[in-house]
Image (cartoon, grey):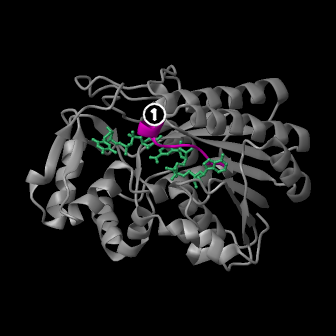
Amino acid sequence: MKIIVTGGAGFIGSVMVQYLVNKYPEDMIINLDKLTYAGNLENLKPVEDKPNYRFVKGDIADRKFIFELFETEKPDVIINFAAESHVDRSVEHPEEFVRTNVMGTTTLLDACKAYGIKRYHQVSTDEVYGDLPLDRPDLFFTETTPLHASSPYSASKASADMFVMAYHRTFGIPVTISRCSNNYGQYQFPEKLIPLMISRALADEQLPVYGDGANVRDWLHVEDHCQAIDLIVRNGREGEIYNIGGHNERTNLQVVKTILAALDKPESLIKYVKDRPGHDRRYAIDPEKLTKELGWKPQYNFDTGIRQTIEWYLDNKSWWERIISGEYQNYFKEMYKDRVTD
Ligand code: NAD
Ligand code: TDX
């Protein structure tokens, strides 16, 4: 099978690519990534010389490029991770979110329509459902919860999901969608809560907690997310949506305090700052459909997963220090100067 993973140089995409390359040596895995600020080929070092792995630099919203790629590669499966993914950036600059997240998705779907595909999988998010109230812990997002996006980021992801389902119904494209809760783990870009707080705490810098810190996120280890996507792509039913989550709800303050305790740093580093506009209060996933239909179960619980993740950031200081200094962006030039014309 030939699988194109888009956004495979990002946080979750790079873990997915490593997982597929190692688990399915008979499959060819093509990592298609534009290498925006969030794309880092250093994440792929463990697999970059494997015979069933290839990197292609390109933009999912570039129609000519995508159609030519489908023409030459004739992929069997597309797993679309490529996206602008940071909510705060979407508040500042929504345009790029529409371009990549919506038009990039429709460009890929058009190519699937023109050249055929065995499975198009859209990696979506629980943020498309909006948020839940803090005083109703009995409520969870299910696959039939109405879409109610709050931020330009989640509106762009919800819009993409609607196009995916429309292309399924109108043109018969064999699609699946997964909607996962917040991920944590290795290779997460240090703009997101957990790696940001780890890197700042280690430097004894203030930790900016938005609002009152009582917002709740439902955390899932990135490897559990990737395993679920693999199951859905191979065994999930066409035209279906699957929620992914592991019932690991924590307030932001609990997460930050856990990090401080693990690093032996004082809570006085916490600094309450102005809230994110439109800040969602609580996310919580009901993963029952995925569990019942496909037998998926997460391997990690948050308490052990977060400890391992903190260890990873301690052991891989140079990885995130090169990001903070901007040096990682030279890696493509160094590694690929003789391999691609760009
Ligand atoms: P990320 O920002 O770390 O990575 C995104 C990747 O996409 C980068 O490598 C970037 O270079 C690439 N990219 C961006 N625009 C592109 C374009 N136009 N063409 C080709 N490549 C492009 O994101 P992430 O956190 O790994 O998230 C991956 C996917 O998972 C996203 O679709 C996101 O919405 C979804 N998701 C993320 C989480 C989470 O907690 N991080 C949770 C649920 C769903
Ligand atoms: O400095 C910060 N201080 C703070 O209090 C940052 C960066 C975040 N926060 C809060 C905001 C959120 O309540 O922490 C929580 C987590 O924030 P993010 O890491 O930015 O994630 P979130 O907004 O929840 O979205 C993430 O999960 C769903 C991903 O970035 C999305 O791509 C995914 O779809």
Q: Quadrant of residue 123?
A: top right
The residue beneath circle 1 is: 92
**Three-letter amino acid code at the position of disc 1:** Glu
Give the image location of residue 281, x and y in percent.
Answer: 30, 29
Res 25 seen here: yes
Residue 43 vs residue 300: left or right?
A: right
Where is residue 7? Give x, y as percent: 62, 53
Residue 316 seen? no
**Ligand 2 image position (quadrant):** top left
Q: Position of residue 271 (x, y in %)?
A: 16, 44
Prevailing secondary structure class for the magenta stretch in the rendered image = loop
Judge left or right: residue 251 versus residue 186: left
Above or below, 54 against 174 in this view is: below
Would residue 207 be counted in the magenta stretch?
no
As for residue 85 lying within the magenta part, the answer is yes
Is the residue marked 1 within 8 Å of ligand 2, measured from its CB?
no
Query: Which residues, given as a range, are shown in magenta?
Result: 80-89
